[in-house]
Image (cartoon, rainbow, N blue to C red):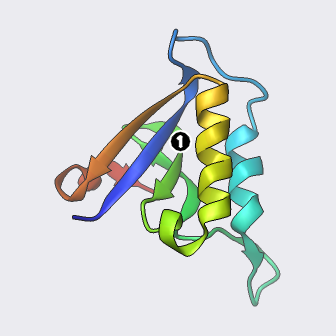
Amino acid sequence: MHCKYIIEGYTEDGRKFRPSDWIDRISSMMASYGKQHRLVYSDLLHPELYDGQKCLIIDDRLEQENPGMYEYVMNFVKSNGLRMRKVCDLDQDKLGR
């Protein structure tokens, strides 16, 4: 089953996480510049709207394809107490870039 992790911009106790651009900063770690000289995010790690809220999306394939990045992001989430949920196949229709 294919799954993604949705990391919200809020801590587990409900506070908004700062700095507010942390999602873009982490996403840019695996981004590259495309042919039109614009930043292109990886399908494995990118910002996206989920239920109308900007979140960090981690595809579970990241763990196999780039274990170091996966570990870095998961440690960041854990050490900052960010809200995270795992969404598999059926719930992915809520995702919308």
Residue 6, above or below 64: above
The spot of residue 79 in percent (x, y) is 66, 27
The 10 Å Cα crowd at callout 1, few under 14, some 14 to 19, many 20 or more, is: many
Nearest the camera: 74 or 89? 74
**Quadrant of the drawing holding the N terminus:** bottom left
Q: Residue at x 74, y 30 (%)?
A: 20
The spot of residue 17 in percent (x, y) is 67, 22
The spot of residue 49 in percent (x, y) is 47, 46
27 displayed left or right of 7: right
| Helix, strand or loop for disc 1 | strand
Nearest the camera: 33 or 70? 70
Nearest the camera: 95 or 73? 73
Nearest the camera: 21 or 87? 87
Residue at the far right in the pictured view: 37
Q: Quadrant of residue 80?
A: top right
Residue 24, above or below 64: above
Q: Label 1, on which residue?
A: 55
- Amino acid marked by disc 1: Cys
Q: Residue at x 60, y 64 (%)?
A: 67
Q: Residue at x 64, y 47 (%)?
A: 73
Residue at the far left in the pictured view: 90
Q: Quadrant of residue 93?
A: bottom left
Q: Residue at x 32, y 57 (%)?
A: 3
28 displayed left or right of 92: right
87 displayed left or right of 71: left
Residue 23, above or below 59: above
